[in-house]
Image (tube, rainbow, N blue to C red):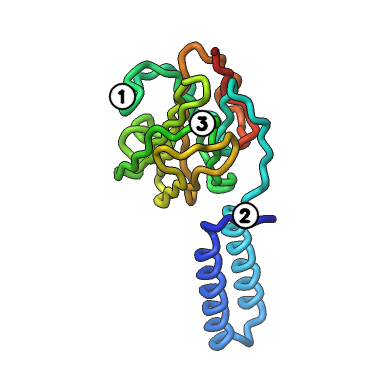
Amino acid sequence: MTIHKEGFTILVITILAIVALNGVLYYFFGDQRILMNISFIASTIFFLLILQFFRSPRVITSIDSNLVYAPADGKVVVIEEVEEKEFLKENRRQISIFMSPINVHVNRNPISGVVKYVKYHAGKYLVAWHPKSSTENERTTIVVENENGISILFRQIAGAMAKRIKWYVEEGQPVVQGEEFGFIKFGSRVDVFVPLDAEICVNLNQKTKGGKTILAKLKV
């Protein structure tokens, strides 16, 4: 299992904390075998939970300029027509993916193209499925224009637990479909805004895999 770079520091801190805690317990209660066994088992489970959160499986995406891939693992919680007011200034179909703490939290480019817009917004930490989280929570908005001149806007949104949004792209940078553009730590949401004439290929409550699940087919 490959571990994402965002997890290295947290994993080291977790190991040191677990060693220190168990060391203190052993010093004071080393003769209480049941307590020490419980502590060891609980520490192991806790570490494995943190470890699985930062797993980063390799994803091979078939590049296709007519397709919009899911940017994240998770579950589709919104498919609706909305007015995108930040950059596109037009009605779009919004597809939102909720990422639980047990999902892979790597974020991947839904299309290939050139980054036209990147902006970070400080904000609240409403639960990720709250209707206002898309516009009021801490978030990062990214717009990529593909070779056919179609722009796709996608937005990383922090949730009640996720307060660490990372993005690795900047305006003017070419990006490749399926490659990483960011990471969100500990539960979150990603919104994707596709043209109204795009064919939606997912349903509500459907589970997605970043870089593998097709969200929509674009009309050229």
Give the residue drawn at x 67%, y 42%. Answer: 59
Residue in the picture at 46% in, 31% down: 144
Give the image location of residue 1, x and y in percent.
Answer: 69, 55
* Quadrant of the rendering where the C terminus is positioned: top right
Q: Estimate the x, y position of residue 91 in percent, counting from the top left.
A: 37, 16
Q: Nearer the viewer, mark 1 or mark 2?
A: 1
Give percent across and percent down for residue 187: 49, 46
Name the residue type under label 2.
Answer: Gln
Report the residue at 40% width, 43% height from top: 158
Identify the mark at residue 113; answer none if there is no mark: 3
The vertical placement of 26 against 51, above or below, is below
Q: Residues within 10 Å of mark 3 (few under 14, many from 20)?
A: many
* Mark 3 or mark 2, whichever is nearer to me: 3
The residue where tag 1 is placed is: 85
Disc on res. 52: 2
Compute the Cα span from label 1 to label 3.
22 Å
In space, the residues marked 1 and 2 are separated at their CA atoms by 36 Å
Residue lying at 35% horizontally and 23% vertically, measured from the top left: 88
Disc 3 from disc 2: Cα separation:
31 Å
Three-letter amino acid code of the residue under disc 3: Gly
Judging from the image, what secondary structure is the residue with disc 2 in?
A: helix
Residue 210, x across and y down, in percent: 60, 37
Instruction: Determine which of the numbered discs, if any, sits on residue 67 in the image.
Output: none
124, 45: nearer the viewer: 124
